[in-house]
Image (cartoon, rainbow, N blue to C red):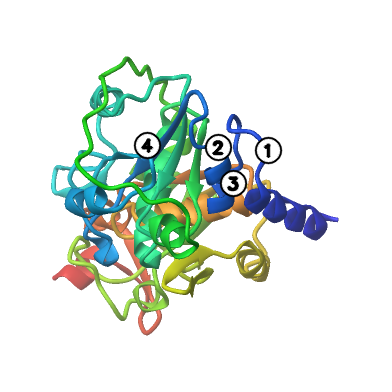
Amino acid sequence: MRSRLLIATAALAIAGPAHALHPSPLVDAEWLEGQLGSDDLVVLDVRSAIDDGGDRESFEAARIPSSRYSSYTDAGWRESRDGVAGLMPDVEDLETLIGGLGIDNDDTVVVVPAGTGPTDFGSAARIYWTFKALGHDEVTILNGGFTGWEQQGFEIASGSASDPETVDFSATLQEQLLATTEEVEAAREAGEQLVDARPPAFYRGENQSPAARVPGTIPASVNLPHDGSLEAREGAYYLQPDSLMARINELELDHDAPTVAFCNTGHWAASGWFQLSEIGGLDNVTMYDGSMAAWTRDDERPVQMADRGTVSVGELAN
């Protein structure tokens, strides 16, 4: 029964409803083309240099009609604090950022990545998660991103884009979607589900991010690589729900149990959270934005490596 329910959830995620409000988490270009011009619909293009996705100049050269631009890497969607990169900014700063894009609490936001690679998809997933964490549920991701839109022959706009009028956006932090380091420590001690969204070489401790002090993963975690179900089609990358469901089922995760998604700096983790929570149907998933960058700050915390087992950060750092 659970398997049939999961397959139904995946189908809904792709099909989406027939109207602009309350969209499914993942929509396709045909759906979006039918909604352009709808009241309270904002198409938010978040292309950046990630996976050679582009920048504002690229956006002004070719974009979805009526879309607005906000660089994922440069606009302030993430910040560094106390030596840890990729953290969620203060709620007030995000309210200012979003309101400055002309987005208010009544708008439905379609987040558009470049569509040029699996890591680029994480840009849309992280901004999607940010809206959800701020209490704004009217948000979705365009599967295939701008590249998919362009490859499928839908209308393209170009030329200088004027800045939208600033509006008020009011947020209410949904703390259940954001895991702190202390909460992750407690989750590990309680035997709750920890999901590492990094590629396998990072999970095994063979590769190390410069943001983390040491290689390895949080002990007892399982690996759901962020890119495992993102497939290229005519140059654009699409999340494939059927493939994702199979991979989630292979991990034998409890869909009702508390689950924490993490990576190096909360980018791939956002893809992991989106895949588990919004497509996979797990009911209680949080995202650890500090991830291994924050976890490895303390010499006493444990990390697990494929070739050494569980050791302390201090043992590896020294």
Q: Secondary structure at mark 1?
A: loop
Q: Amino acid at mark 2?
A: Gln
How far apart in space, not on screen, are marks 2 and 4 (Cα)? 11 Å
Pointers 1 and 3 in contact (C-beta within 8 Å): no
Q: Amino acid at mark 3?
A: Trp
> Is residue 140 depicted above or below 147 in this figure?
above
Q: Nearer the viewer, residue 209 or 213?
A: 209
Q: Position of residue 1 (x, y in %)?
A: 86, 56
Q: Residue at x 48, y 50 (%)?
A: 142
Q: Residue at x 28, y 77 (%)?
A: 207
Q: Secondary structure at mark 2?
A: helix
Q: Amino acid at mark 4?
A: Ser
How far apart in space, not on screen, are marks 1 and 3 (Cα)? 8 Å
- Earlier in the chain: of badge 3 and badge 4, it is 3
How crowded is the residue under tag 2: few (<14 C-alpha within 10 Å), some, or many (20+)?
Answer: some
Q: Position of residue 32 (x, y in %)?
A: 53, 44
Pointers 2 and 3 in contact (C-beta within 8 Å): yes
Q: Position of residue 43 (x, y in %)?
A: 41, 38
How far apart in space, not on screen, are marks 4 and 1 (Cα)? 20 Å
> Is residue 313 depicted above or below 87 in this figure?
below
- Earlier in the chain: of badge 1 and badge 2, it is 1
Residue annotated with mark 3: 31
**Residue 262 appears anywhere in the view:** no
How far apart in space, not on screen, are marks 2 and 3 (Cα)? 7 Å
- Earlier in the chain: of badge 2 and badge 4, it is 2
Q: Which circle, 4 or 1, is nearer the viewer?
A: 4
Residue annotated with mark 2: 35
Residue annotated with mark 4: 66
Residue annotated with mark 1: 18
84 relative position to 267: left or right: left
Q: Secondary structure at mark 3?
A: helix
Q: Nearer the viewer, residue 269 or 117?
A: 117
